[in-house]
Image (tube, rainbow, N blue to C red):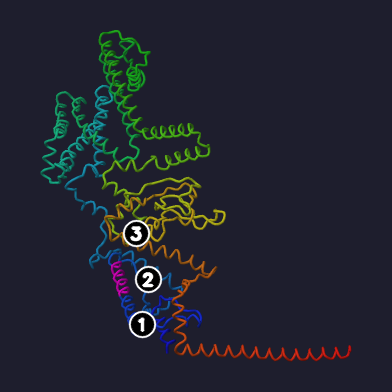
Amino acid sequence: EEEEELETAVRAWPSQSTTSSADDGLNQRPASSASQTSNVVNERLQELVKLFKERTERVKEKLIDPDNSDDETPPASPAKQAPVPPPEPPAEQKPEQEAAEAPAEKEEEKTKLLCHKVKPRSRIGRLLQYRFPSSIDPFTSLIYVLWLFCVSLAFNWNAWMIPVRWAFPYQTPDNIHVWLLIDYLCDAIYILDILAFQPRLQFVLHGDIVTGKKEMRNNYIKAVRFKLDVVSLLPLELLYFKTGINALLRLPRILKFMSFFEFNKRLEAILTNAYVYRVIRTTTYLLYAVHCNACLYYWGSSFEGLGFSEWTYDGTGNSYFRCYYFAVKTLLTIGGLPEPTTLFEIVFQLINYFIGVFVFSIMIGQMRDVVGAATAAQTNYRACVDNTVKYMASYRIPKDVQNRVKTWYSYTWQSQGILDEQELLDQLPDKMRLDIAVDVSYNIISKVPLFQGCDRQMMFDMLKSLRSVVYLPGDYVCKKDEVGREMYIIKAGEVQVVGGPDGKTVFVTLKAGAVFGEVSLLAVGGGNRRTANVVARGFSNLLILTKRDLNEIMVHYPVSQKLLRKRARKMLMKDKKPAEKKEEEKEPISIIPPRAEMPKLLKAVLEMTEKSGMKGTWSKLKDRNNRLSVSLQVHNNYYIYIYIYNFTLKLTKKNIILNI
């Protein structure tokens, strides 16, 4: 009965170690049934409390992260058997059926919309149904930019052709209808711009975007641009009936220059390489100045008379190109021009020289500014490289290290066009920086198992803390056993997880979009140590999130912080289980710790208790049997010894008698 009670006590406390032999079980003191029952009840209650706590935690996790499923999936319900498909028609009948169904499908090209069959709207119908927008955003509307392009074409036609038609005899009665048709088409574009587009432009008033029709119309009417647009459309062509068709009467059309400058601004905001357009625009300004000078030179020559002197145009060849060549030499002060003889020629040439020097210096200055702004980033890059090379040379850095530094500079500049992306992003507002980070990295970081189901705003804060780093081929991203302080997201390139005795065995290759090092950020269960070496296979661009940034973010999200730590602990335990199984196969590990040595006082008490009861009687019987066996052995040995002694004594007596 005492042994049965001891066994039940051992089963009641699963955490206690059981004995491996019968002798060890005899050394334990049996507990009373009342104490055993109370202990069993207490431990059962504690176990129930623990189970309730675990259930509560699981329910909380489901509320926080509804996408996560339970560890144990329920058994699958029996699937409903699908109906047996009808037998397929013979292969010969299929083409005939398809050929018969094709015309029917073509005839019934209809789409189902709200349970009604309607025919798709044609392009002409969609064009007729188009409604002009009530308000236009001048900064983001592509339609407005295209319209400004049309207005700029009309402005350039007037700006370039009015001087030509006034000075050169290119406008004749035979082609006058073509000139007038293009002129009135440009006037129609001007009128449509004033009536349809400009009164619908949104504007900002006290920080608010105004989209009301009346407010937008009043804002345009009060602006200086409206006055210039109205003056540019003065109907001076009515004077054609008195003076004849004179292109100078269309000179007010050039007052539409504000639309041309606005188009340049909007186009520069859209273009990726805006500096190329700036160079072209500045060159066009110079060509236009030469164009106007050529027209004035031909007018001056015709005023004095063609071929009047060596200075005037003699009328041979193409008049426009000959005068343009003279204007280029004059404005650029090349020299080699004929000397003016009359007062008109001298004054005209002096004005030409002054204007040429002024215009040419302005154009050269603008060109220098445009080219300098376009190459400012490259100049900064060259300065950084030169300073770094000087620094390494002054400290006598090894050549291989210098070459790797130069390679890093070269690849970073070629791939990104900037050395530090964070410096560029810091200039933007926080909201715009978040929008850029979401477009670049949100799809990657949302797929990380550790962060799935976390607070969305917390993930946005993490995206703003990411920074880009470029690694060269063969660079160690992280080494084994070092303290992990970063999480890595592969933006471009590949990295390899290596190890083995020689440290060169490739375990796995991670490609763009992969994430590693996320568990070490939370440092749970000693998991802040790197478990393997990670080497960049080629040029790799990684996004890095530091542990410090993550801790600063998680302070504001305690629920997500608790969830992250729990997930990291689970992931760490999953990684450790295979390693523990391998170690168990190699060498058995004692799960139960060795028993501590029994105190001497307790040994004395146990010896006294063993002498009483059933165990005491059994021990006394064992001692008595042992004593009897020992005494029998002693008696037997004694008798044998006496027999041998008597036998030897008789032999010695006989020998003595014989000798006598």
Image point (49%, 68%), residue name: 581
Q: Position of residue 448 (x, y in %)?
A: 37, 58
Relative to 366, 413 lies left or right? right
| Segment colored magenta | 49-62
Residue assigned mark 2: 71
Image point (32%, 19%), residue name: 331
Callout 2 environment at 10 Å: few (<14), some (14 to 19), or many (20+)?
few
Which SS class for mark 2?
loop
Residue assigned mark 1: 36
Relative to 233, 52 lies left or right? right
Residue 514 makes an appearance in the image: no
Which SS class for mark 1?
helix
Residue 557 versus residue 369 in the image, above or below: below
Label whose residue precedes the other's in the sequence (3 or 1) = 1
**Prevailing secondary structure of the magenta residues:** helix
Label whose residue precedes the other's in the sequence (3 or 2) = 2
Residue 60 in magenta? Answer: yes
Residue assigned mark 3: 451
Spot the residue most to the front. 660
Residue 176 makes an appearance in the image: yes
